[in-house]
Amino acid sequence: MANAAELTVDGKSYSFPTLEGSEHEKAFDISNLRDQTGYVTLDRGYKNTGATQSGITFLDGEEGILRYRGYSIEDLASKASFLEVAYLLIYGELPTQDEFATFETAIRRHTLVNEDMRKIFDGFPVNAHPMAVLSSLVSAMSAFYPDSYDDTAEASTDQHIIRLMAKLPTIATWSYKRSLGHPINYPKNNLDYIPNFLNMMFALPVEDYKVDPVVAEALNVLLILHADHEQNCSTSTVRLVGSSKANLYSSISAGVSALWGPLHGGANQEVIEMLEEIKNGGGDVNKYIDMAKNAKTTGFRLFGFGHRVYKNFDPRARIIKKAADDVLAKLGVNDPVLEIAKGLEEAALNDEYFVSRKLYPNVDFYSGIIYRALGIPTNMFTVMFAIGRLPGWIAQWKEMREQKEPIGRPRQIYTGATLREFKSIEQR
Ligand code: SDX
């Protein structure tokens, strides 16, 4: 008999089945809790609640382990290309050469965005935050591809996956070029995925642009490291929106919006702005450590630190920290902010407040330093996170649909006014 969890409440005993995943994570299955007991659970922020069973990404917060479909993040970051990892996440296996060629060629041939989308784009203020533009234009894609509402057209799901993977980088570069007053660049079919993105970001009509292989390789690693992270805030948003049978574009657009928050993907922009502030204020990292320790009065958080799941070093932060040294050295960039970051990390990791709360650098702490060295502006950092996370969002949405998950609809505990009689305005 499989393990069961016994619950005794109001003098009655109840039994609930338990289940164990392939990596020995355990859960109580409380699908019938309310029907049996009349109780629901309350778990703010879902810190203890599993929303689904998934075969995509495994992470162990205590051991600092991250694997996509069973492959370690260390292996994938050092040996794979971002599109190989995207295929792995979305379709479950590393592609054969033929499978990769078909996937990569399809993406290469769909990088153009409908010219009518530029009318929407041109309506934004020139200083619009690129995440506002990205979430809007991704949502607008559902208007341009109405067969995305047709859930029966299985083939069209793959087509929409290709369109999103292909067009997100194009859309992402538009807002940057416009913010500079530069003409936008069109994608080129003779360039690979990341060189194509770099060319659209940095090429100017007045001179030839040559992609630096060091920059392209660093971006390949960063996109892989951001590609998925099980049921994080933005991925849960994509799943929840998709669970209502909303189309893929609308679901991904919702994920972009959730990622923008400074407690989530928006943290990489906040980290650089925080490090710049420390540098410009004289580099006193201990002042900011103290501010963070008195968060209740200062309201200040050390961005790039802490994680809901990792209570040990975020394995991605470890890889990015090393890459930061390598990339800056190869590019001959001396960024004093990197030294500030290292000083801040050192001070925090030796401070009881952080140690006792198991607050370690997370993926956002060092990523901005590399993006900056690659010439990517701060307000584009979270857009880079979205480009990386796109295959993970797609994979999770696809799995949710294939597993025929029910519409997500959490319960609550009502704490408002009990029944009261309406009084006309004259009587109030
Ligand atoms: C990402 O979920 C994912 O997987 C996300 C992500 C992904 O790949 O999708 O990994 C990407 O979002 C990384 C996280 C980026 N966010 C930041 O760097 C923002 C700063 N970090 C925090 O806001 C916080 O650590 C969170 C939001 C990341 C996690 O918050 P939790 O799990 O809800 O933890 P908490 O807020 O309950 O904090 C626990 C304690 C509190 O102190 P006490 O109430 O016990 O006194 O730790 C403190 C917090 O005040 N704390 C911090 C802190 N983070 C938590 N104190 C100072 N600085 C911080 N950064």
Image: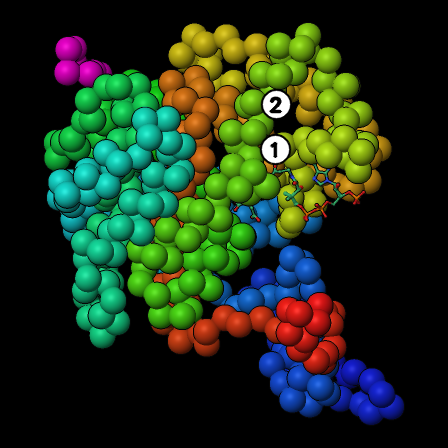
- Towards the viewer: 113 or 315: 113
Q: Residue at x 56, y 67 (%)?
A: 51
Reply yes or no: does residue 208 show up in magenta.
yes
Q: Residue at x 42, y 46 (%)?
A: 256
Reply yes or no: does residue 40 show up in magenta.
no
Is 197 left or right of 92, judged from the image as shown? left
Work out which quarter of the rendered image holds the C terminus and state it. bottom right
Q: Residue at x 20, y 26 (%)?
A: 184
Foreground mark, 1 or 2, reads: 2
Q: Residues within 10 Å of mark 2 (few under 14, many from 20)?
A: many
Q: Residue at x 12, y 35 (%)?
A: 189
Instruction: Kindly identify which residue carries mark 1.
Output: 304
Q: Where does ligand 1 appear, by image quarter?
A: top right
Instruction: Kindly identify which residue carries mark 2.
Output: 274
- Residue range highlighted in magenta: 204-210
Is 28 left or right of 276, judged from the image as shown? right
- Towards the viewer: 230 or 236: 236
The kind of secondary structure element at disc 2 is helix
- Which amino acid type corresponds to the residue marked 1 in the rendered image? Gly
| Mark positioned earlier in the residue sequence (1 or 2) | 2
Residue lying farthest front?
426
Contact, CB < 8 Å: mark 1 with mark 2? yes
